[in-house]
Structure formats: structure tokens, C-alpha cells
Image (cartoon, grey):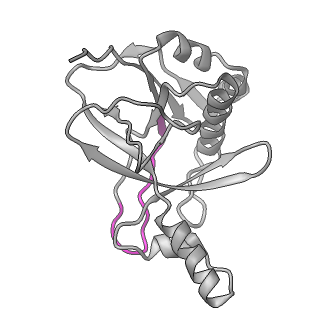
Amino acid sequence: MSTSRELYYFDFFIKREEEPEAGQLPTLVTRIVLSGIHHFLRNTNRANIGVAFPGWVESKGVGHMPEVGKIVRVISEDADALFEMRGNAWFTCQILAGDIAVSKIKPVPATASHVCYVRNREAEMAARDLKRATGKPVNALAINRQSDDPAARLRFLTPAKTVNMMVKKVPVDQRIEGDFSSYGLCCKELMVSVPEF
């Protein structure tokens, strides 16, 4: 059995105070950080960097989606890749404007438990099925909000369009290694974990 390599991380701290938007959407600065991470991962063709949300707040029930909080944690076995991302020009103007702060790169505590941040497509598929059945557009966000176990809503800005994504936090018993998506997340079929601490 092979030994897992050491993990490293750094944090983006969202400093600019903004009121959450309708639909419990993360603040604009959080979306800019997430979009910058996506652009970096896509442009460098990396699948070894994941994201976590240490300030995650669970749903309070039907009608209330989980919230991701004001820290976006970036995690990888490759400290050099983290260093490259941390200094990427995408984030420089946000740092200089005082909207975000960035921590040093540090080793992940060996005792950290693990979770998966999983892209959840259940509401998207339900909306598509209802549209086919009724011929009328159906809002996936409304379906998600009325779920007994709603997902958090993330938004990424891509060159072609804005991508809305539902994400669930799934606890796991141990570290699960693998490739992350270009959003730093995993999918239900290919689970990859990140440390939670």
C-alpha cells in the first residue's frame, strides 16, 4: 500500500464586506476568487488542486441553502503549484484593492479529517426533466432551495458564460486521492477529498 504524500494549503480571506445577494449567492469577491482559481486550473491544465470552504454553514432546512463562508482554501500535494497560483496576476488587483488577503503556504495538519465538495446535478436534472414534461422553463435554483437537503450555490465566470453550480459537502472516513475538476471540486462518480480543519 502506498503512502499518501503530504498536503499543503493556503487561504484566500474575503475582506470586503458585502451583503449576500438574493438566493444566498456567495459575494462578488468570493465569485471572483473562485473564477480565478478555475481560470488558473484550466489554463495550466492542473487536476491536482482542490478547494475547500472552512467557513461552510450547513443548511437550516427547506428554503435555506448552505453558505460557503468568507474563506476559500486551496489544497494540493504540489506546493510549487500553490505558490504559482497564489502569485497569479488574477488575484493581484483584488489584493491591492484590499478585497482579499492571502495566507502563507503551510502543511496541512496530519490529523485533519477529510470531506468531499461534490458538484450536485440533481436539481439541474430535475429542472430539465420538468421542462421536457411541461414545455415550460423550470428554475433549478428553486428546486434546490425546496429540497430537504439543499446544496450550496457557487458561481464561476468563464470566458464564454457564467456557470452556476450546486455543491454539497460530503464527509468521508479517510482521504480519497484522485483528480479534481477544473473548478477544484469533484463529482459523485469520481470522489476526491480535501482536508477539513
Q: Is residue 117 toward the left or the right of residue 140 in the image?
A: left
Could you say which quadrant of the image residue 25 lies in?
Answer: bottom right
Q: Is 125 placed above or below 105 here?
A: below
Is there any visible trace of residue 73 in the rendered image?
no
Q: Residue furthest top?
A: 80
Predominant secondary structure in magenta? loop
| Residue at x-position 33% and y-position 66% | 60
Residue 115 in percent (x, y) is at 31, 40
Residue at 51%, 32% in the rendered image: 13
Query: Which is more toward the observer, 106 or 22?
Result: 106
Tell whether 194 sits left or right of 185. Answer: left
Give yes or no for residue 69 being in the magenta stretch: yes
Quadrant location of the N terminus? top left
Residue 92 colored magenta?
no
Task: Residue 91: tell me if it is visible.
Answer: yes
**Residue drawn where x is 44% and y is 21% of the image:** 76
**Camera-nearest residue between 148 and 67:** 148
Is 102 placed above or below 65 here?
A: above
> Which of the two residues, 40 or 54, is positioned nearer the viewer here?
40
Q: Quadrant of residue 111?
A: top left
- 175 displayed left or right of 55: left
Camera-side residue of 2 and 155 = 2
- Whole-percent x and y of residue 136? 68, 86
Name, please, the residue furthest toward the front.
1
Is 33 placed left or right of 153 in the picture? right
Magenta segment, which residues?
59-73
Quarter assignment of residue 84: top right
Q: In which quarter of the image is the C terminus?
A: top left
Give the residue furthest to the right.
160
Q: Position of residue 121 (x, y in %)?
A: 50, 61
